[in-house]
Amino acid sequence: MKFATKAVHAGAEPDAQTGAVMTPIYQTSTYAQASPGDHKGYEYSRTHNPTRTKLHEALSALENGKHAFVFSSGMGAIDTVLKMLQPGDEVISTNDLYGGTYRLFTKTYARFGVGFHFVNLADFGAVESLINEKTKWIWVETPTNPTLNITDIEAICRLAHKHGVKVAVDNTFASPYLQNPLNLGADLVMHSITKYLGGHSDTVMGGLIVNDDTLAEQIAFNQNATGAVPGPQDCFLVLRGIKTLHLRMERHCENAEKVVAFLQSHPAIDKIYYPGIPSHPGHEVAKKQMKAFGGMISFTLKNNTTEAAVKMLSNTHLFTLAESLGGVESLIGHPATMTHASIPKEEREKTGVVDSLIRLSVGIEDAEDLIDDLNKALNKI
Ligand SMILES: *Cc1c(COP(=O)(O)O)cnc(C)c1O
């Protein structure tokens, strides 16, 4: 089945009992049992909920995975993966990791004796030199946040698997429409569903998708044991969001390409980070592993100061200044003081998160209106 058909139909058969075409919101914590242990597959909603089950089916279909799990946030999903580790285990990840993931690794799990290494994941020599018998996972983000670096998923999986190391891919920025890491050899896919999958900036949720039955068992155990589950209403909202994922992503990508062309022509702009630009170092790999280049763009100003960035940010009207991304509406953000504020200045500047770096989540509005909004704000600097 093709993607658009799966987006509309996966996990969406009419309700067996009533024929309801849309998945009912099973707003219940518990389920009647005929006699102890004699139930219909549902006992308690921390473990299972029928609305959540339908969302699991939809996500598995979109990522071509066998098992999917949803969580109360993206961080809850990542936390559940880390709970499979033991003190002494090690994880290798990218040096421009999402700030919240970096914080969870270095501030929470490092205290429990898990070791973390951050490198440029495009530098396979550096990655291989860090792999040892304690290495359990390589945690990949591609494209990365906010400088849109690209990792060759197929190649990093080949390297990791040669050493018996598993690969997890945070696929939030691409969404399952643009990229399917399991098809490229990854062991686990993670999503902040809050972003493109939900798509309407109205729900916080995370997801994990895997093929391996043993991994799935461990995830199910840890999720049930520690409890980061979403409610049925949120699952319903995401099921609704998913039905238009392909249409939204097409427009996000189209608009982003138009915005990039505009930024390239504006004299106030210094660097532009977008994997669709042929001079972007990850362009060829992105072309190979993604269907299009996504809706996220970052750029720096020739006037590389926080003041100039703040002037621009506070003068857009269609682009709302806010954290997050991936909703139908356009957002603008300042990574240095917002998403990446928890990363020390020297660390963040090494990866391009300088004071004037501005990140756009290009929405699905009319591209001409978006460009006009950016142009007016840039001319205020
Ligand atoms: C937002 C985000 C997360 C965290 O997800 P939440 O739903 O906010 O908990 C993880 N990775 C990336 C790339 C993100 O953008």
Image: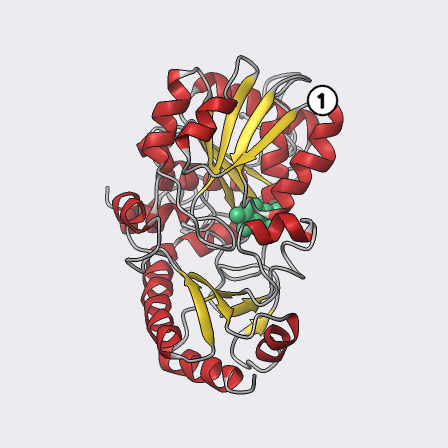
| Rendering coords of residue 305 (x, y %) | 62, 71
| Rendering coords of residue 6 (x, y %) | 31, 45
Q: Is residue 235 visible?
A: no
Q: Looking at the figure, which quarter contains the N terminus?
A: top left
Q: Is residue 113 visible?
A: yes
Q: Amino acid at mark 1?
A: Gly
**Relative horizontal placement of residue 112, taking residue 119 as reference (left or right):** right
Instruction: Determine the secondary structure under disc 1.
Output: loop
| Rendering coords of residue 249 (x, y %) | 36, 59
Residue under numbered circle 1: 113
| Rendering coords of residue 280 (x, y %) | 35, 55
Q: For this rendering, which residue is in front, 33 or 132? A: 132
Say above or below: 273 vs 342: below
Say above or below: 357 vs 150: below
**Relative horizontal placement of residue 126, taking residue 90 as reference (left or right):** left
Q: Which residue is painted at 64% across and 25% down in the image?
A: 115
Label 1 crowd (10 A; few <14 / some 14-19 / many >=20):
some
Q: Which residue is painted at 65% across and 30% down in the image?
A: 44
Q: Looking at the figure, which quarter contains the C terminus?
A: bottom right
